[in-house]
Amino acid sequence: HVDFLLLGGGAAAASAAETLSLESTGKSILMLSAEDIPPYRRPMLSKQGLLGDAPALLHDDAWYRAQQIELALNTRAVSVDTDQHLVTTDAGETLHYDKLLIATGAQPRALGCPGERLPGVHHLRRWADREAVRDDIRAGAKHAVVLGGSFLGMEIAMTLNALGLSVTVVELGLLLLRHTESPEVSAEARRGAEEAGVTILLGDQVSEIRGEDRVTQVVTAAGRTLPCDILMVSVGVAPATVFLAGSGITLEKGLVVVDDQLRSSAADVFAAGDVTLFDDPVFARRRHIEHWDNAVKQGRLAARNMLGQGRRYDEVSYFYCDFGRFSFSMLGMPEGAAGQVRRGSWADASVALFYLEEGVPRALFSMGRPPEETRAAEGLIRYRVRLEDAAAKLADP
Ligand code: FAD
């Protein structure tokens, strides 16, 4: 029997474990992680981690021992029985819980293209994936193709470029970083990447992956043939919730549906991080977010609610992205905005874009800007402040 059973070894489970250990006494906490190292800063995988740094662990082994948190690595939950409060693991163990947290995150989507399983074709989600890419580079890989020009794809492209590989990004859409919903951001990201020597192909996709023992070429739908020793597939993720089939927990498109206190449809079962579809009171709608800050904060809040505190999740969503000289953050929800107002200039690498909806700022893209501006924008977004003459006011420095 465990008081608090946490499924997952990522940011959400780790921040929940930390909060539970700080805010309760004498309760047992067990984390199950499918990975072989303790929770670490996953975002570094495509940045310093790929460049060669050691994993940035959130806590070392001594910390888990001191907090009396049991961390079971290489252990997967394979089923959940919410009536009996039981979880079964791939080691054949059955665990009884008082409160359960689902924080199993996401896993890379497959392309569904022949050749996808050839050596040299990679996803980047776990530390083991980073090891495999670095092994290929050490073995002499020179040409990389990156499929997907969103945040992760662009970070990987710029890091491989910094490691001296020739890099081509193939993006199906006509914009890079499409989640920013900004042609201006896309164009600037493209300019920065091309200046660094990365080739960008928009409106194209892979149609064939070629190679005998390992990948050697990628053929695109537009008929291009690209030499390739490393193919990085970065075309999105799917929630890691297959093990919840038959549990009775309500899922939508594989995501765990939770309310604004991060409670699932089953008694005593909570969820946090990339795996959730949650009620966001700031925008009064259901949202799904795949970013670090959200995972950390939801993990913390879910833990408090596992302790019976009944708190609402009402954060203004935030993320950062970092590639080459292009390093920015985003607050709020760009989807659905009617237009963008710019302060600052790209030439000075100092740009704020306010996304407006009927005079109400709903998101902020921010690069090289003063922190006071970001703080002020957060308030405007959180409280849905309507500004008279918003475009003119926001553009005026
Ligand atoms: P995850 O981090 O996915 O952790 C889930 C854990 O559960 C994993 O350890 C997994 O192995 C384990 N697991 C899965 N199934 C089971 C099971 N059945 N039983 C037991 N364990 C299981 N976000 C940003 O905001 N900024 C960035 O710059 C950024 N860069 C990123 C770069 C990369 C390469 C990646 C992959 C992600 C990046 N992100 C970034 C996203 C961010 O890392 C995620 O949003 C965050 O890690 C989500 O945390 P999580 O705990 O919800 O899930």
Image (cartoon, grey):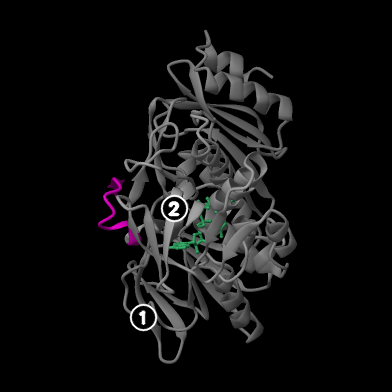
Q: Is residue 6 above or below residue 361?
A: below
Report x, y in % for residue 86. 37, 57
Describe the element under mark 2 as helix, strand or loop: strand
Q: CA distance from mark 1 to mark 2?
A: 43 Å
Q: Is residue 332 left or right of residue 15?
A: left
Q: Quadrant of the C terminus?
A: top right
Report x, y in % for residue 33. 52, 64
Where residue 223 sits, quadrant-wise, is bottom left
- Would residue 248 be counted in the magenta stretch? yes
> Can you identify the residue that label 2 sits on?
97
Q: Amino acid at mark 2?
A: Tyr
Q: Which residue is depicted at the point 54% across and 41% down?
A: 303
Report x, y in % for residue 284. 39, 25
Q: Is residue 333 visible?
A: yes
Q: Decide which of 65, 8 is in the foreground and name it.
A: 65
Q: Is residue 175 above or below residue 95?
A: above
- Would residue 10 be counted in the magenta stretch? no
Q: Amino acid at mark 1?
A: Gly
Magenta residue span: 243-253
